[in-house]
Amino acid sequence: MGKYQTFQYDVVVVGAGGAGLRAAIEASAQGAKTALVCKSLLGKAHTVMAEGGVAAALSNVDSRDDWKVHFRDTMKGGKFLNQWRMAQIHAQEAPSRVRELEEWGAVFDRTKDGRILQRNFGGHTYPRLAHVGDRTGLEIIRTLQDKGVHQGIDVHMECTIRKILKDGDRVAGCFGYQRESGRFVVFQSKAVVLATGGIGRCWEITSNSWEYTADGHAMAMWAGADLIDMEFIQFHPTGMVWPPSVKGTLITEGVRGEGGVLLNKDRKRFMFDNVPEMFRGEFAETEEEANRWVAAVVANKLPDARRPPELLTRDVVARAIRREVREGRGSPHGGVFLDIASRRSPSEIKKKLPSMYHQFKELADVDITKDPMEVGPTCHYMMGGVRVNPETQESTVPGLFAAGEVGGGMHGSNRLGGNSLSDLLVFGKRAGEFAAKCALQTSSFGSCDDDQIEVAARECLEPFDESHGENPYAVHEQLRTLMQHYVGIVRSQDDLKHALVEIEQLRQRAAKVKVGGNIQFNPGWHLAMDLSNMLDISEAVTKAALERTESRGGHTREDFPDSESEWGKMNLIVRQEGRDINVSRRPLEPMPAELQQLFNK
């Protein structure tokens, strides 16, 4: 270990998005010496891309809302595959976490009487999303960063963690490298919190930035932790489709929450034809009724009509858009139209959706106060992740915790918009709290074995030893294309089996990629290492998707188009055994009778 830069902390938090910051703040507040390690610069977290709002039953706009309705919406949105206790904790604690942010200085939009304003969002019965225009994630990161920095948390920026170090069965720390210098670094710790986000860079069209290369999912699996619900990938219905340079860039659901409508090339509102049976009675069946709802929202009144079908859950809307395009009713560039211009005045659009206005003006030369946007599905969020204890967020590996998108179980087969921000606040706090308790109750640091560090270091340097290998960027682009075409919004047995064969071939090629230059800031070398994460997790997703022979939420099988009652009673668990990635079935824990009654009304 003398060869490497070394640090010693009670708790190391990997990832500095909302979940990581909230975990580090809580661990530090509990008295644990805490480090926050981030792959990019502080403030560059993907949480800033969460625009529409944070879901919490504050009941500021509609007094009928409470945690029970939020819980019910979350379970229905996840098609009842959610870990019910996580969904319950989330719904109960989200209001406190939002008010806490307000106390720490977060600036939210306000009602006329000064309370936090809330907006409508897909899948939520009542207006529930506390927001700051369409820049909510940015405000949350700003607030948490200020709180964390003033609390004195040590921050290690531009540092990539590659491996969880273990002493026997439990966590002993983690190993990584400084991205600028290439110098290897060892963090010895009693607990590690993974808050690394998602896996979207495995797909060709994604709203995710370059950091989302499945780091935490892979490291947890390599360390022996269980992954859960890996077949469920959320394709956000509305990403930019033109120009090509910005394809996949997110368009907030807040556009539809403020009354925006989806139109095909014939300018028909096609979502009325796409309301699933389980949601009938909750959504408008005619344009007149939907328009009445919008008019009430614009006038800041409680609607007496049902919600527009554009506010159905994301999986439903994404599939509906895909169908319009495939059947020849799409927009000129392979999407559909999202129109807010005919629903709201230019001043309202600029006030409510300032980021969207500037995004389209600058990137696509489109004025959304006058013209509709072209939109299409984009890989956005991973519902699956590390299987954790709902109360503590500890994984099946002692001392290893997970929160935010890298943690699994909370969202079931499909996440509701806005639940990601409240999820990372609620479970980020819990992960930090219990990681600190775990560390402070552990009398001594585990031994960071020199051999496992040496092996990890040698694996990192292998791309420099290849003389005839290929470019890592070429392998990555082929993986993204493969996953987009064969493990995308709609899957089939033949496609998934083909994908597994191709992934194995890509793995063999990735093992021999070549990088030039030296170890100092070398993006090609960084990507060469990230390939192992993305290939293993792509295989995990594909195998889980092949195993689940039904359609549910973010997983649609062309050859099994219906949801099956038996599949609704179990989750799929992925774990690595030796070099093999295997999938097994795990029965859902029964929901208590008092919670079950909420769905009988």
Image (cartoon, rainbow, N blue to C red):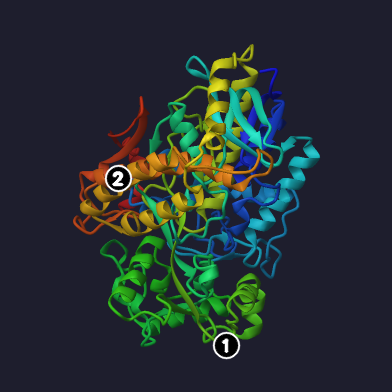
Q: Residue 356's image quarter?
A: bottom right
- The amino acid type of the residue labelled 2 equals Leu
- Residue 370 is labelled as 1
- In the depicted view, which residue is nearer to us: 172 or 599? 172
- Compared with residue 342, is residue 414 higher up or lower down, i.e. above or below? above
User: What residue is at 36 percent from the left and 79 percent from the top?
Assistant: 330
Residue at 66% over, 40% down: 518
Q: Position of residue 149 (x, y in %)?
A: 78, 41
What separation in Å lies between label 1 and label 2 (alpha carbons)? 46 Å
Query: Residue 410: x, y in percent?
Result: 44, 44
Disc 2 is placed on an element classified as helix
Q: Position of residue 444 (x, y in %)?
A: 64, 12
- Evaluate if marks 1 and 2 touch, with contact meaning CB atoms under 8 Å apart: no
Nearest the viewer among 485 and 49 is 485
Residue at the extreme top of the image, as rendered: 443
Q: Which residue is mark 2?
A: 500
Residue flagged by tag 1: what amino acid is it? Answer: Lys
Looking at the image, can residue 434 be seen?
Answer: no
Q: Is 522 above or below relative to 580?
A: below
Check the picture and name the quadrant holding the C terminus: bottom left
Quick one: SS at disc 1?
Answer: loop
